[in-house]
Amino acid sequence: MLTVLDSLPAGLLNTPAHQLHEVLPGPTLIHLPGRREQPLFVSVLLHGNETTGWLALQELLAKYQDRPLPRALSFLIGNIAAAREQRRHLEQQPDYNRVWADGPTPEHQMMRQVVTEMAQRGIFASVDIHNNTGLNPHYACVNRLEDAFLHLATQFSRTVVYFTRPDNVQSIAFARLGPAVVLECGKPGHPYGVQHALEFLEGCLNRLHLPNRPVPVHDLDLFHTVAVVKVPPGVAFAFGDRAKDLCFPPDLDHFNFHEIPACTRLGWVRPESMAYLEAWDELGQDVRQKFFKINGDEIWTTVPVMPSMLTLDPQVVRQDCLCYLMERMSWPTH
């Protein structure tokens, strides 16, 4: 499935995400040389409707068309077929950011090939660029609480989320090769998201090394993802429609990155439906009773929580989740 190139195809830098299928045959890994040999690895469009990463890469590469890159750059342009339809992934496809662990599909094999090839080159760092569909600040995610990882993350945002599940994502696969970070750049289509990602990538290309000293406490707001919240399959839900099994407020995503207290109402249940919200912790255990209770026809939090990635997009809820729940972490300064 994977095309590997060592130069830019003609017209690539002028091609929007939804037309990449006209220039590339499918998922494509491109290696470009730079003054420093150890490459920065970047993945974009693992979700076909999250275009900020590709736009930032286009602007970055256009700046260096007539001069050498400060550092070698390898980048994966992911789900081109889904980008054509401006969707996260197509119905017959797996999620391209859930196939980075062992698995039987051609997509699993393709991502193993990407990891193997980049392991042979020895990465400087890995950057996976995403958008989200709800109201979220720009933030970075890491999968290891190591100094280099946190320094890389805080170059993008002082808000950093540590998670270990799902464990089949790009950043966990690349964390075995070197410092790896996920950039969450807000909603697609916002120019500031592109500019923010562009500045981060250019900073990485020009950086000689990542510090091994602790990140100062005042430069870091660190959170730990403790649960993923899902709507059970077969449960009808909506935002603002109380006739469905589950109904959520139409402004539910305003809770993102706010520490909300216990006894906060998150939505309503149609009583005869027996519907509920699922919550699964990092070990895959059912923890919904720890976080939620149903009182009459209302869903309430039972403990203080901070949601992230609450979305109002029903397709994202079905394909991924309703949100994640986080808790604040203190970070030792050694």
Image: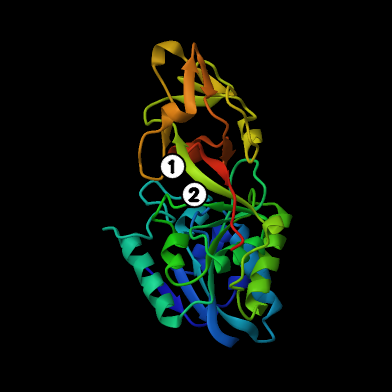
Q: Please, what is the three-letter code of the amino acid marked with disc 1? A: Gln
Task: Give above or below for 316 relative to 124.
Answer: above
Tell me if I can see residue 308 in this picture: yes
Task: Say whether residue 273 is left or right of residue 329.
Answer: left
Q: Nearer the viewer, residue 230 or 333?
A: 333
Q: Nearer the viewer, residue 226 or 60?
A: 226
- Residue 249 location, quadrant: top right
Quick check: marks 1 and 2 in contact, CB under 8 Å?
A: yes
Q: Which residue is nearer to you in this view: 77 or 176?
A: 176
As helix, strand or loop, the secondary structure at mark 2 comes to loop
The structure residue drawn at horizontal position 55% and vertical position 37%, both measured from the top left corner, is: 313
Q: Residue furthest left?
A: 104
Kindly identify which residue carries mark 1. Answer: 319
Residue designated by label 2 = 88
Residue density around tag 2, few if under 14, some if 14–19, many if 20 or more, within 10 Å: many
Residue 54: image quadrant is bottom right
Q: Position of residue 102 (x, y in %)?
A: 30, 60
236 to 221, vertically: above or below = above
Residue 10: which numbered mark, if any? none
Under mark 2, the amino acid is Arg
33 shown above or below 276: below
- Of badges 1 and 2, the one in the foreground is 1
Lateral position of residue 284 relative to residue 129, left or right: left
